[in-house]
Structures are given as C-alpha cells and as structure tokens.
Amino acid sequence: MSLLNTDFVQDLLNKVAGLDNDQGDARIKQITRRVVADIFRVIEDFDVSPDEFWSAMGYLTAVGQANEAGLLVPGLGLETFLDLRTDEAEKQAGLEGGTPRTIEGPLYVAGAPLTKAEARLDDGSEQGEVLFMEGQVRDLNGAPIAHAVVDVWHANTLGGYSFFDPSQPKFNLRRRIETDADGRYRFRSLLPNGYACPPDGQTQRYLDVLGRHGHRPAHIHFFVSAPGFRKLTTQINIDGDDYLHDDFAFATRDGLIPPVMRVPIPPPSTRAV
Ligand SMILES: [Fe+2]
C-alpha cells in the first residue's frame, strides 16, 4: 500500500510546501513540493529505514561542514547536466559552434592579476615541466576579438590550487590576460597534474560507497569574456592523462583536448649564446 498517494500525505505535502497559503515564492513552493514528494517516494519505494534516513542527513551535514558541496555536485554529474541543458537551450536558440563549455568547478577565485597579451602564471618557486600555451579568441565567424579577457586558473604539480592550498603564493597559477589587437593571448606556466578528491573527505566517502574513484585528469580552467559576447566557461585537458576519459567530475569533452607538443631542451653546450 502506498502511503504517498493517500489524501493525508498529499495534503501534508501541500502544507509542507506552503501551498495552503498565498504568501512566499510560488516557484519555490512548487519545486519544494516536488522535491519533498520525490524524497517521500524514494523512502517508500526503497523501504528506507529511519537509521538510513538519519545517516543520510548526517552525511549532508558533514558535507556542509567540510565545505564540499561544490565537489559533490560535479561528482554526481549535476554540474555536467546543467551544461548539457545550457547547450540544448543555445541550440534551440540557434546558437551553435565555438569552443565547447564545461564545468567551472568550485575552485575559481575572482580578481587575479590582469595583464595584456601575455602572462607568466607561476613565480618560479616551483619546479616542473614548463608549459607554454597560446591561442586566439575568435567570434563564431572566425573574426578575432581584441580586448577579450582570458581568465585562466589551474592546479600546481601536486594538484593543489592557490587560496585553497595555503602553501602557495596568492593568485599562484591564476591570471587574467587581455587579448591583443589580433585576439591573441599566450602564457607560460607549469604543466599541472591531475588531482583527486581529498581521500578522507566527504565526497570521497560517498564515492567509495558507489565503488567510484575521485580522480580528475590534468586540466586548465578558463573563463573567456568580451563585451557583447556570451561568457565561455571551459577547460582544456592535458592529453595523455590516465584519467582523460574517466573524470570523476564528467568534464572532459570532445574539442577540449588540444595537442601537447613536447619540445626537448638542447644541452647547454649546443645552445646559442
Ligand atoms: Fe580544476
């Protein structure tokens, strides 16, 4: 027998969502009723015990206390689903083409130093494989966009991000680069490594129960913006990473894996003076 479908529970849901009053926000009320009804349905369909239910509530509390909501959300594919929805809405509006979007993730920090045309993202204090990247910001017709801002951020060789990793200098591996008259930008940095959810964290705790890993392949984040254009939120992946197509956050997309060209450094004796 379904309790959910009884008049008593349906009336309870209406009261829970405030549908028996004319105050508040109508959309939030509708969504609340749906969400709570769906939770009721899950409890009923899966015969969720009170212990299981309170365990889940304890988990959500722990996620909040650990500030890991922003990590759990991409891990559950929700951030990717929002991207897919935006892709679809743009397609319906006739807005197709260009560099694919992908998730922002929880580790962006606004206000990175702004430079013109080029930047160095590291301060030279960390050893690693030197990375050069250059590109051109273009509109959908291929015309270059001058004075666009390329906001770039990525992890260090240990997979940590400045601000969240207190061992790194402020704004380390974070810059905003304004494109030149030809829409071009370039930067020097250190090749980032992939990283994983904190092994003792709440997101990984959930992933363990699902039999999943919490690894992300090495990647570099970008916002690209210019007046009169939609803002692009995207990433590139570093080709060759073991997790390239097995990202716990589901952010890898075709078109976001540029070729990486490794350039041997000539021995000092053969270098031009
Ligand atoms: Fe990231």
Image: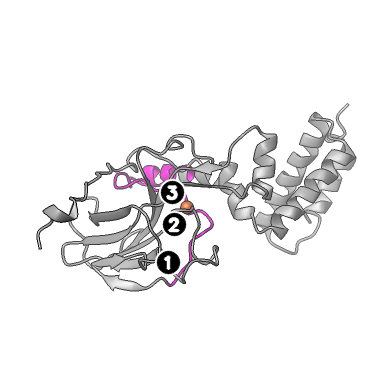
Q: Is residue 179 left or right of residue 41?
A: left
For the residues labelled 3 and 2, the Cα–Cα distance comes to: 7 Å
Answer with mark 3 or mark 1, whichever residue precedes in sequence. 1
Q: Residue furthest left?
A: 272
Q: To which residue does mark 1 refer?
A: 172
- SS label for mark 3: loop
- Residue 19 within the magenta-colored segment of the rendering: no
Label 2: state its secondary structure: loop
Q: Nearer the viewer, residue 119 or 71?
A: 119
Q: How is the image coloured?
A: one colour
Q: Amino acid at mark 2?
A: Asn
Tell which circle, 1 or 2, labels the residue nearer the N-terminal end: 2
Tag 1, which secondary structure? loop
Would the CB of label 3 be found within 8 Å of ligand 1? no
**Dot 1 crowding, Cα within 10 Å, few <14, some 14–19, many 20+:** many
- Other residues around mark 2 within 10 Å, as few (<14) / some (14–19) / many (≥20): many
Dot label at residue 156? 2
The answer to whether the residue labelled 3 contacts the one labelled 2, judged by CB atoms less than 8 Å apart, is yes
Quarter of the image where one finds residue 145:
bottom left
Q: Which circle's residue, 3 or 2, is located before the other in the chain?
A: 2
The answer to whether residue 92 is above or below residue 67 is above
Q: Nearer the viewer, residue 150 or 140?
A: 150
User: Is the C-beta separation of discs 1 and 2 under 8 Å?
Assistant: yes
Whether residue 227 is visible to the viewer of this picture, yes or no, is no
Q: What residue is pinned by disc 3?
A: 193
